[in-house]
Image (cartoon, rainbow, N blue to C red):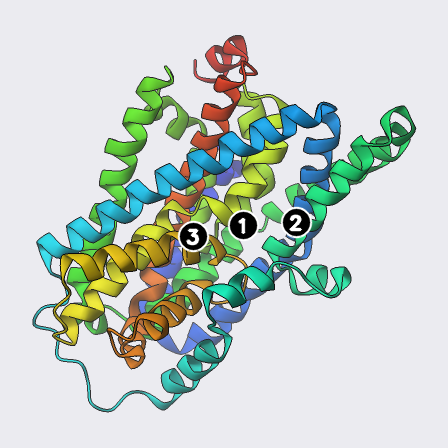
Amino acid sequence: MKKVLLNLNFQVLIAILLGVLVGKYFPTFAPTAKIISEKFIDLIKWLIAPIIFLTIVLGIASMGDIKKVGRVGGKAILYFEVITTFALFIGLAVANILKPGEGLAVAASHNAKDLTKLADYEKQAGSGWDFLTHIISPNMFDSFTRGDILQILLFAILFGFGISKMGAAGQSLLGTFDKLAKVFFNIMKMIMRLAPLGAFGGMAYTVGTFGVKTLRPLAALMGSVYLTMFLFIFVVLFIVCRLCKFSLFKYLKFIRQEILVVLGTSSSETVLPAMMEKMEQFGCSKSVVDLVIPTGYSFNLDGTTIYLGMAVIFLAQAFHVPLTFGQELSLMGILMVTSKGAAAVTGGGFIVLSSTLMATKMIPVEGLVVLFAVDRFMSEARAITNMIGNGIAAIVIAKSEKEFDQNKYLSATR
Protein backbone atom coordinates (compact mmCIF):
# COMPACT_ATOMS: atom_id res chain seq x y z
CA MET A 1 0.00 0.00 0.00
CA LYS A 2 2.84 2.40 0.88
CA LYS A 3 4.47 1.69 -2.48
CA VAL A 4 1.24 2.61 -4.28
CA LEU A 5 0.82 5.85 -2.31
CA LEU A 6 4.38 6.91 -3.14
CA ASN A 7 3.96 6.14 -6.84
CA LEU A 8 3.94 9.37 -8.89
CA ASN A 9 1.38 7.95 -11.35
CA PHE A 10 -1.06 7.34 -8.50
CA GLN A 11 -0.39 10.75 -6.92
CA VAL A 12 -0.99 12.62 -10.19
CA LEU A 13 -4.20 10.69 -10.88
CA ILE A 14 -5.55 11.46 -7.38
CA ALA A 15 -4.51 15.10 -7.78
CA ILE A 16 -6.46 15.38 -11.04
CA LEU A 17 -9.60 13.93 -9.44
CA LEU A 18 -9.26 16.23 -6.42
CA GLY A 19 -8.79 19.18 -8.78
CA VAL A 20 -12.05 18.37 -10.57
CA LEU A 21 -13.95 18.11 -7.26
CA VAL A 22 -12.47 21.29 -5.81
CA GLY A 23 -13.14 23.19 -9.03
CA LYS A 24 -16.76 22.05 -9.10
CA TYR A 25 -17.67 22.62 -5.44
CA PHE A 26 -15.29 25.48 -4.55
CA PRO A 27 -15.10 27.62 -7.72
CA THR A 28 -13.83 30.64 -5.75
CA PHE A 29 -10.56 28.73 -5.30
CA ALA A 30 -9.93 28.94 -9.07
CA PRO A 31 -7.64 32.05 -9.01
CA THR A 32 -5.41 30.45 -6.38
CA ALA A 33 -5.43 27.15 -8.25
CA LYS A 34 -4.35 28.99 -11.41
CA ILE A 35 -1.34 30.46 -9.57
CA ILE A 36 -0.37 27.00 -8.25
CA SER A 37 -0.50 25.52 -11.76
CA GLU A 38 1.30 28.44 -13.39
CA LYS A 39 4.11 28.45 -10.83
CA PHE A 40 4.70 24.73 -11.30
CA ILE A 41 4.97 25.24 -15.06
CA ASP A 42 7.23 28.27 -14.43
CA LEU A 43 9.59 25.99 -12.50
CA ILE A 44 9.72 23.71 -15.53
CA LYS A 45 10.25 26.63 -17.91
CA TRP A 46 13.29 27.70 -15.87
CA LEU A 47 15.05 24.59 -17.12
CA ILE A 48 13.67 24.05 -20.63
CA ALA A 49 15.95 26.53 -22.44
CA PRO A 50 19.26 25.28 -20.93
CA ILE A 51 18.22 21.62 -21.26
CA ILE A 52 17.30 21.99 -24.93
CA PHE A 53 20.51 23.93 -25.62
CA LEU A 54 22.75 21.42 -23.85
CA THR A 55 21.10 18.31 -25.30
CA ILE A 56 21.16 19.63 -28.87
CA VAL A 57 24.83 20.65 -28.53
CA LEU A 58 25.74 17.27 -27.01
CA GLY A 59 23.69 15.41 -29.62
CA ILE A 60 25.45 17.12 -32.52
CA ALA A 61 28.98 17.33 -31.10
CA SER A 62 29.00 13.75 -29.76
CA MET A 63 28.17 12.35 -33.20
CA GLY A 64 31.50 13.63 -34.45
CA ASP A 65 30.65 12.94 -38.07
CA ILE A 66 29.06 16.09 -39.53
CA LYS A 67 27.57 14.04 -42.35
CA LYS A 68 25.80 11.88 -39.78
CA VAL A 69 24.37 14.96 -38.06
CA GLY A 70 23.06 16.21 -41.38
CA ARG A 71 21.66 12.79 -42.24
CA VAL A 72 19.88 12.33 -38.90
CA GLY A 73 18.62 15.91 -38.90
CA GLY A 74 17.43 15.60 -42.49
CA LYS A 75 15.60 12.35 -41.75
CA ALA A 76 13.98 13.92 -38.67
CA ILE A 77 12.75 17.02 -40.53
CA LEU A 78 11.42 14.90 -43.41
CA TYR A 79 9.64 12.57 -40.98
CA PHE A 80 8.18 15.53 -39.04
CA GLU A 81 6.81 17.12 -42.21
CA VAL A 82 5.24 13.90 -43.52
CA ILE A 83 3.59 12.98 -40.20
CA THR A 84 2.30 16.50 -39.45
CA THR A 85 0.86 16.63 -42.97
CA PHE A 86 -1.10 13.44 -42.22
CA ALA A 87 -2.20 15.02 -38.92
CA LEU A 88 -3.41 18.17 -40.66
CA PHE A 89 -5.24 16.19 -43.36
CA ILE A 90 -7.05 14.04 -40.77
CA GLY A 91 -8.03 17.13 -38.77
CA LEU A 92 -9.49 18.87 -41.82
CA ALA A 93 -11.29 15.70 -42.95
CA VAL A 94 -12.96 15.05 -39.57
CA ALA A 95 -13.97 18.73 -39.22
CA ASN A 96 -15.60 18.65 -42.67
CA ILE A 97 -17.41 15.37 -41.99
CA LEU A 98 -18.67 16.11 -38.45
CA LYS A 99 -19.13 19.89 -39.00
CA PRO A 100 -18.77 20.89 -35.32
CA GLY A 101 -19.16 24.62 -36.08
CA GLU A 102 -22.60 24.37 -37.70
CA GLY A 103 -25.42 25.65 -35.54
CA LEU A 104 -23.13 27.63 -33.25
CA ALA A 105 -24.48 31.12 -32.70
CA VAL A 106 -21.46 33.37 -32.41
CA ALA A 107 -22.18 35.94 -29.71
CA ALA A 108 -22.44 39.53 -30.91
CA SER A 109 -20.86 40.85 -27.73
CA HIS A 110 -17.71 39.23 -26.45
CA ASN A 111 -16.14 39.25 -23.04
CA ALA A 112 -13.98 42.36 -22.76
CA LYS A 113 -11.14 40.39 -21.18
CA ASP A 114 -11.18 37.93 -24.09
CA LEU A 115 -11.07 40.77 -26.62
CA THR A 116 -8.07 42.25 -24.84
CA LYS A 117 -6.28 38.90 -24.96
CA LEU A 118 -7.16 38.51 -28.63
CA ALA A 119 -5.73 41.95 -29.41
CA ASP A 120 -2.45 40.90 -27.76
CA TYR A 121 -2.30 37.73 -29.87
CA GLU A 122 -3.05 39.68 -33.06
CA LYS A 123 -0.17 42.07 -32.33
CA GLN A 124 2.19 39.08 -32.11
CA ALA A 125 0.83 37.47 -35.26
CA GLY A 126 2.88 38.13 -38.36
CA SER A 127 3.45 37.02 -41.92
CA GLY A 128 5.39 33.97 -43.07
CA TRP A 129 8.37 36.26 -43.64
CA ASP A 130 8.11 37.48 -40.03
CA PHE A 131 8.13 33.86 -38.89
CA LEU A 132 11.36 33.16 -40.80
CA THR A 133 13.14 36.32 -39.68
CA HIS A 134 12.03 35.69 -36.08
CA ILE A 135 14.27 32.60 -35.92
CA ILE A 136 17.40 34.76 -36.02
CA SER A 137 17.62 36.81 -32.84
CA PRO A 138 19.77 39.95 -32.52
CA ASN A 139 20.69 38.83 -29.00
CA MET A 140 21.22 35.19 -28.06
CA PHE A 141 20.91 35.96 -24.34
CA ASP A 142 17.48 37.49 -24.95
CA SER A 143 16.41 34.23 -26.63
CA PHE A 144 17.30 32.31 -23.47
CA THR A 145 15.56 34.88 -21.26
CA ARG A 146 12.32 34.60 -23.24
CA GLY A 147 12.66 30.84 -23.74
CA ASP A 148 12.27 31.15 -27.51
CA ILE A 149 12.69 27.53 -28.58
CA LEU A 150 13.29 28.08 -32.30
CA GLN A 151 16.00 30.69 -31.71
CA ILE A 152 17.67 28.49 -29.07
CA LEU A 153 17.56 25.52 -31.45
CA LEU A 154 19.34 27.47 -34.18
CA PHE A 155 22.02 28.73 -31.79
CA ALA A 156 22.49 25.24 -30.27
CA ILE A 157 22.90 23.67 -33.73
CA LEU A 158 25.56 26.22 -34.69
CA PHE A 159 27.28 25.83 -31.30
CA GLY A 160 27.29 22.03 -31.66
CA PHE A 161 28.84 22.25 -35.13
CA GLY A 162 31.38 24.73 -33.73
CA ILE A 163 32.51 22.26 -31.05
CA SER A 164 32.61 19.35 -33.51
CA LYS A 165 35.00 21.38 -35.70
CA MET A 166 37.45 21.55 -32.77
CA GLY A 167 37.98 17.79 -32.79
CA ALA A 168 39.81 16.44 -29.72
CA ALA A 169 40.31 19.97 -28.35
CA GLY A 170 36.55 20.31 -27.86
CA GLN A 171 36.17 17.15 -25.77
CA SER A 172 36.89 18.89 -22.46
CA LEU A 173 34.15 21.45 -23.15
CA LEU A 174 31.85 18.64 -24.19
CA GLY A 175 32.54 16.86 -20.90
CA THR A 176 31.64 20.03 -18.98
CA PHE A 177 28.40 20.37 -20.93
CA ASP A 178 27.56 16.74 -20.21
CA LYS A 179 27.99 17.34 -16.47
CA LEU A 180 25.89 20.51 -16.65
CA ALA A 181 23.14 18.60 -18.46
CA LYS A 182 23.10 15.99 -15.67
CA VAL A 183 22.77 18.77 -13.07
CA PHE A 184 19.72 20.21 -14.86
CA PHE A 185 18.19 16.74 -15.22
CA ASN A 186 18.63 16.16 -11.48
CA ILE A 187 16.93 19.49 -10.72
CA MET A 188 14.08 18.50 -13.04
CA LYS A 189 13.62 15.21 -11.17
CA MET A 190 13.22 17.14 -7.91
CA ILE A 191 10.70 19.52 -9.46
CA MET A 192 8.71 16.63 -10.92
CA ARG A 193 7.92 15.45 -7.41
CA LEU A 194 5.64 18.51 -7.36
CA ALA A 195 3.77 17.30 -10.45
CA PRO A 196 0.67 16.26 -8.43
CA LEU A 197 0.45 19.82 -7.08
CA GLY A 198 0.67 21.28 -10.58
CA ALA A 199 -1.91 18.83 -11.90
CA PHE A 200 -4.29 19.64 -9.03
CA GLY A 201 -4.00 23.38 -9.61
CA GLY A 202 -4.52 23.09 -13.36
CA MET A 203 -7.68 21.00 -13.09
CA ALA A 204 -9.16 22.98 -10.19
CA TYR A 205 -8.69 26.25 -12.10
CA THR A 206 -10.14 24.90 -15.35
CA VAL A 207 -13.26 23.36 -13.82
CA GLY A 208 -13.74 26.20 -11.31
CA THR A 209 -13.49 28.92 -13.95
CA PHE A 210 -15.43 27.45 -16.86
CA GLY A 211 -17.57 24.75 -15.27
CA VAL A 212 -19.39 22.15 -17.34
CA LYS A 213 -22.39 24.13 -18.62
CA THR A 214 -20.27 26.67 -20.46
CA LEU A 215 -18.77 23.86 -22.52
CA ARG A 216 -22.02 22.64 -24.04
CA PRO A 217 -22.08 25.00 -27.07
CA LEU A 218 -18.55 23.89 -27.98
CA ALA A 219 -18.81 20.25 -26.94
CA ALA A 220 -18.98 19.17 -30.58
CA LEU A 221 -15.62 20.78 -31.33
CA MET A 222 -14.03 19.25 -28.23
CA GLY A 223 -15.39 15.81 -29.09
CA SER A 224 -14.19 16.16 -32.68
CA VAL A 225 -10.68 17.17 -31.57
CA TYR A 226 -10.38 14.27 -29.11
CA LEU A 227 -11.74 11.82 -31.70
CA THR A 228 -9.23 13.03 -34.28
CA MET A 229 -6.32 12.77 -31.84
CA PHE A 230 -7.46 9.20 -31.03
CA LEU A 231 -7.61 8.30 -34.74
CA PHE A 232 -4.20 9.83 -35.38
CA ILE A 233 -2.54 7.91 -32.53
CA PHE A 234 -4.25 4.57 -33.05
CA VAL A 235 -4.35 4.58 -36.86
CA VAL A 236 -1.51 6.72 -38.28
CA LEU A 237 1.03 6.21 -35.50
CA PHE A 238 -0.04 2.57 -35.09
CA ILE A 239 0.82 1.96 -38.76
CA VAL A 240 4.17 3.75 -38.29
CA CYS A 241 4.96 1.51 -35.30
CA ARG A 242 3.99 -1.65 -37.20
CA LEU A 243 6.18 -0.68 -40.16
CA CYS A 244 9.10 -0.07 -37.79
CA LYS A 245 8.41 -3.33 -35.91
CA PHE A 246 7.70 -2.17 -32.38
CA SER A 247 4.50 -2.12 -30.33
CA LEU A 248 2.54 1.13 -29.93
CA PHE A 249 0.74 -0.28 -26.89
CA LYS A 250 3.96 -1.33 -25.16
CA TYR A 251 5.37 2.13 -25.87
CA LEU A 252 2.29 3.86 -24.42
CA LYS A 253 2.44 1.63 -21.35
CA PHE A 254 6.13 2.49 -20.91
CA ILE A 255 5.43 6.28 -20.90
CA ARG A 256 2.16 6.12 -18.93
CA GLN A 257 3.58 8.24 -16.10
CA GLU A 258 4.52 11.03 -18.53
CA ILE A 259 1.05 10.87 -20.13
CA LEU A 260 -0.58 11.40 -16.73
CA VAL A 261 1.67 14.36 -15.92
CA VAL A 262 0.88 16.01 -19.26
CA LEU A 263 -2.83 15.31 -18.72
CA GLY A 264 -2.72 17.23 -15.45
CA THR A 265 -0.48 20.12 -16.50
CA SER A 266 -1.61 20.54 -20.15
CA SER A 267 2.04 21.00 -21.10
CA SER A 268 4.35 18.56 -22.85
CA GLU A 269 7.33 20.66 -21.71
CA THR A 270 6.93 19.27 -18.20
CA VAL A 271 8.09 15.83 -19.34
CA LEU A 272 10.81 16.77 -21.86
CA PRO A 273 13.76 15.52 -19.74
CA ALA A 274 11.82 12.45 -18.57
CA MET A 275 10.89 11.53 -22.16
CA MET A 276 14.52 11.80 -23.25
CA GLU A 277 15.59 9.42 -20.49
CA LYS A 278 12.71 7.06 -21.25
CA MET A 279 13.57 6.93 -24.95
CA GLU A 280 17.14 5.93 -24.09
CA GLN A 281 15.81 3.23 -21.76
CA PHE A 282 13.45 2.13 -24.55
CA GLY A 283 16.44 1.44 -26.82
CA CYS A 284 17.26 4.65 -28.72
CA SER A 285 20.85 5.88 -28.76
CA LYS A 286 21.62 9.00 -26.72
CA SER A 287 22.93 10.94 -29.74
CA VAL A 288 19.67 10.41 -31.70
CA VAL A 289 17.48 11.21 -28.69
CA ASP A 290 19.43 14.39 -27.89
CA LEU A 291 18.92 15.66 -31.43
CA VAL A 292 15.42 14.44 -32.34
CA ILE A 293 13.35 14.99 -29.16
CA PRO A 294 14.20 18.70 -28.54
CA THR A 295 13.89 19.49 -32.27
CA GLY A 296 10.50 17.79 -32.31
CA TYR A 297 9.20 20.26 -29.74
CA SER A 298 9.17 22.89 -32.49
CA PHE A 299 8.86 20.88 -35.68
CA ASN A 300 6.78 17.80 -34.79
CA LEU A 301 3.66 19.24 -33.16
CA ASP A 302 1.17 16.60 -34.32
CA GLY A 303 -1.53 17.48 -31.80
CA THR A 304 -1.18 21.22 -32.32
CA THR A 305 -1.35 20.76 -36.10
CA ILE A 306 -4.57 18.75 -35.82
CA TYR A 307 -6.11 21.39 -33.56
CA LEU A 308 -5.12 24.30 -35.83
CA GLY A 309 -6.66 22.66 -38.90
CA MET A 310 -9.89 21.82 -37.08
CA ALA A 311 -10.11 25.26 -35.45
CA VAL A 312 -9.93 27.02 -38.83
CA ILE A 313 -12.71 24.84 -40.31
CA PHE A 314 -14.76 25.20 -37.11
CA LEU A 315 -14.60 29.01 -37.34
CA ALA A 316 -15.49 28.93 -41.03
CA GLN A 317 -18.57 26.85 -40.20
CA ALA A 318 -19.49 29.04 -37.20
CA PHE A 319 -19.34 32.21 -39.32
CA HIS A 320 -21.05 30.51 -42.30
CA VAL A 321 -18.04 31.05 -44.57
CA PRO A 322 -18.11 28.40 -47.32
CA LEU A 323 -14.60 27.23 -48.21
CA THR A 324 -13.85 25.64 -51.56
CA PHE A 325 -11.57 22.61 -51.81
CA GLY A 326 -8.89 24.85 -53.27
CA GLN A 327 -9.16 27.30 -50.36
CA GLU A 328 -8.85 24.47 -47.85
CA LEU A 329 -5.76 23.20 -49.66
CA SER A 330 -4.20 26.68 -49.49
CA LEU A 331 -5.00 26.84 -45.76
CA MET A 332 -3.41 23.42 -45.35
CA GLY A 333 -0.25 24.63 -47.09
CA ILE A 334 -0.02 27.74 -44.88
CA LEU A 335 -0.60 25.76 -41.69
CA MET A 336 2.04 23.19 -42.68
CA VAL A 337 4.58 26.01 -42.40
CA THR A 338 3.17 28.23 -39.63
CA SER A 339 2.38 25.33 -37.27
CA LYS A 340 6.12 24.65 -36.97
CA GLY A 341 6.48 27.85 -34.94
CA ALA A 342 3.51 27.26 -32.64
CA ALA A 343 5.75 26.44 -29.67
CA ALA A 344 8.15 29.32 -30.22
CA VAL A 345 6.14 31.96 -28.37
CA THR A 346 3.61 32.22 -25.54
CA GLY A 347 0.07 31.52 -26.79
CA GLY A 348 1.57 30.02 -29.93
CA GLY A 349 -1.60 28.25 -31.06
CA PHE A 350 -3.63 31.45 -31.11
CA ILE A 351 -0.81 33.41 -32.71
CA VAL A 352 -0.57 30.89 -35.55
CA LEU A 353 -4.36 30.96 -35.98
CA SER A 354 -4.35 34.77 -35.98
CA SER A 355 -1.58 35.02 -38.55
CA THR A 356 -3.24 32.39 -40.77
CA LEU A 357 -6.65 34.06 -40.66
CA MET A 358 -5.14 37.51 -41.24
CA ALA A 359 -3.07 36.27 -44.16
CA THR A 360 -5.92 34.48 -45.93
CA LYS A 361 -8.67 37.02 -45.06
CA MET A 362 -11.22 34.21 -45.48
CA ILE A 363 -12.55 34.07 -41.89
CA PRO A 364 -13.04 36.88 -39.33
CA VAL A 365 -10.10 36.93 -36.90
CA GLU A 366 -12.57 37.93 -34.16
CA GLY A 367 -13.84 34.36 -34.27
CA LEU A 368 -10.91 33.29 -32.14
CA VAL A 369 -12.75 34.68 -29.11
CA VAL A 370 -15.20 31.76 -29.17
CA LEU A 371 -12.31 29.32 -28.70
CA PHE A 372 -10.88 30.88 -25.53
CA ALA A 373 -13.33 29.19 -23.16
CA VAL A 374 -12.55 25.64 -24.22
CA ASP A 375 -8.95 25.92 -25.35
CA ARG A 376 -7.73 24.71 -21.97
CA PHE A 377 -9.83 21.56 -22.24
CA MET A 378 -8.34 20.71 -25.62
CA SER A 379 -4.76 21.57 -24.68
CA GLU A 380 -4.36 18.26 -22.84
CA ALA A 381 -5.13 16.34 -26.04
CA ARG A 382 -2.71 18.50 -28.03
CA ALA A 383 0.11 18.15 -25.50
CA ILE A 384 -0.31 14.38 -25.09
CA THR A 385 -0.41 13.81 -28.86
CA ASN A 386 2.68 16.00 -29.35
CA MET A 387 4.56 14.06 -26.68
CA ILE A 388 3.58 10.61 -27.98
CA GLY A 389 4.47 11.62 -31.53
CA ASN A 390 7.90 12.94 -30.55
CA GLY A 391 8.82 9.73 -28.76
CA ILE A 392 7.82 7.63 -31.75
CA ALA A 393 9.84 9.93 -34.02
CA ALA A 394 12.97 9.25 -31.96
CA ILE A 395 12.40 5.48 -32.22
CA VAL A 396 11.81 5.63 -35.98
CA ILE A 397 14.97 7.69 -36.61
CA ALA A 398 17.05 5.50 -34.25
CA LYS A 399 15.91 2.36 -36.10
CA SER A 400 16.66 3.92 -39.48
CA GLU A 401 20.18 4.73 -38.24
CA LYS A 402 20.56 1.23 -36.77
CA GLU A 403 21.05 2.84 -33.37
CA PHE A 404 18.21 1.06 -31.60
CA ASP A 405 19.07 -1.48 -28.89
CA GLN A 406 16.59 -4.34 -29.25
CA ASN A 407 17.68 -5.89 -25.94
CA LYS A 408 16.90 -2.66 -24.08
CA TYR A 409 13.50 -2.55 -25.80
CA LEU A 410 12.67 -6.11 -24.80
CA SER A 411 13.81 -5.44 -21.23
CA ALA A 412 11.81 -2.21 -20.96
CA THR A 413 8.58 -3.76 -22.28
CA ARG A 414 8.48 -6.96 -20.25
Q: Secondary structure at mark 2?
A: helix
> Which comes before the other along the chain, label 1 or label 2?
2
At 56% from the left and 22% from the top, the residue drawn is 281
| Residue 50, horizontal then vertical, whole percent | 71, 49
Q: Earlier in the sequence, mark 2 or mark 3?
A: 2
Marks 2 & 3, CB-CB < 8 Å contact: no
Q: How would you rate the neighbour count of disc 3 (Cα within 10 Å): few for under 14, some for 14-19, many for 20 or more?
A: many
Which numbered mark, 2 or 3, is in the foreground of this view?
Answer: 2
x, y percentage for residue 183?
Answer: 77, 40
Identity, as a three-letter code, of the amino acid under mark 1: Glu
**Secondary element type, mark 3:** helix
Q: Label 1, label 3: how many angstroms apart (C-alpha)?
A: 12 Å
Q: Amino acid at mark 2?
A: Leu
- Callout 1–callout 3 Cβ contact below 8 Å: no
Closer to the N terminus: mark 1 or mark 3? 3
Q: Nearer the viewer, residue 61 or 232?
A: 61
Cα separation, mark 1 vs mark 2, equals 19 Å
Q: Which residue is mark 3?
A: 264
Q: Position of residue 207 (x, y in %)?
A: 33, 67
Q: Which residue is mark 1?
A: 269
Residue at 54% x, 70% y: name it: 35
Residue on which the image places disc 2: 154
Q: In the rendering, at what x and y percent does residue 225 appear? A: 24, 53
Q: CA distance from mark 2 to mark 3?
A: 31 Å
Residue 17 seen in this snapshot: no
SS state under label 1: helix
> In the rendered view, does 349 fall on the left or right side of 189?
left
Amino acid carrying mark 3 in the image: Gly
Answer left or right for 45 relative to 373.
right
The residue furthest top is 407
